[in-house]
Amino acid sequence: MQMITMFLLLLTTGVGLSGITGYLIFGPLVFRHMQDRDSTVGHHAFSPAFLGYVLRGDFRSQGDNNLNGLATPAQLLLWSCILGGISSFALVAVYQWQSA
């Protein structure tokens, strides 16, 4: 494996892992904030309905600045988790295809 490929794989894996760990912090905080305001989506912070709600940015329509302050980092971290995972998978797939 070339050095640039290893670097990109490490970089994209790091982006994905930082997204996961960051969402593990901000996701439940957003969900709990919404529970306190009696406006929950889904049953928990990791349900598909809530993940879609955060990814789409639907929280902005509620007009709650505190919710925006919590949910915007959660949205960015969730996107970095998804994009980092897809990029890592693509790099491994391309490497395997070139090695064969």
Image (cartoon, helix red, strand yellow):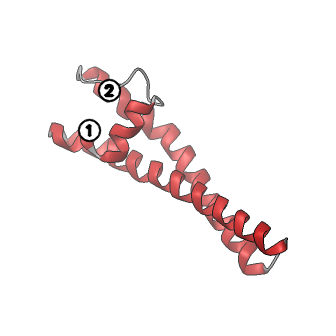
Q: For the image shown, how many numbered marks are present on the structure?
A: 2
The location of residue 29, given as percent across then percent down, is 40, 33
Picture coordinates of residue 74, whole percent (x, y): 41, 45
The circle drawn on residue 81 is none
Which kind of residue does numbered mark 1 sit on? Leu
Identify the secondary structure beneath mark 1. helix
x 33%, y 42%: residue: 70
Q: In the image, is 63 to the left or to the right of 33? A: left
Q: Which residue is mark 1?
A: 67
Q: Hey, which residue is sitting farthest left in the picture?
A: 63
Task: Answer few, some or many: residues within 10 Å of disc 2's Cα (few below 14, many 20 plus, some between 14 and 19).
Answer: some
Residue at the image point whose x is 31% and y is 21% from the top: 35
Q: Is residue 33 above or below residue 21?
A: above
Q: Cβ–Cβ below 8 Å for labels 1 and 2?
A: no
Q: Quadrant of the N terminus?
A: bottom right
How many angstroms separate mark 1 from mark 2 (CA)? 13 Å
Residue 63: quarter of image: top left
Q: Amino acid at mark 2?
A: Val
Q: Quadrant of residue 4?
A: bottom right
Horizontally, residue 56 falls left or right of residue 79, namely left
Disc nearest the viewer among 1 and 2:
2
Tell me the quarter of the image containing the C terminus.
bottom right
Name which residue lies at 31% across and 28% down: 33
Task: Indicate the position of residue 48 as horizontal and vertical percent values.
Answer: 44, 32
Horizontal side, residue 81 vs residue 30: left or right: right
Viewer-closest of 92 and 34: 92
Q: Quadrant of residue 11?
A: bottom right
- Mark 1, Cα crowd under 10 Å, few <14 / some 14-19 / many 20+, is some
Q: Looking at the image, tell me whether mark 1 or mark 2 is earlier in sequence order.
A: 2
Q: Residue at x 38, y 31 (%)?
A: 49
State the mark number for residue 41.
2
The secondary element bearing badge 2 is classed as loop
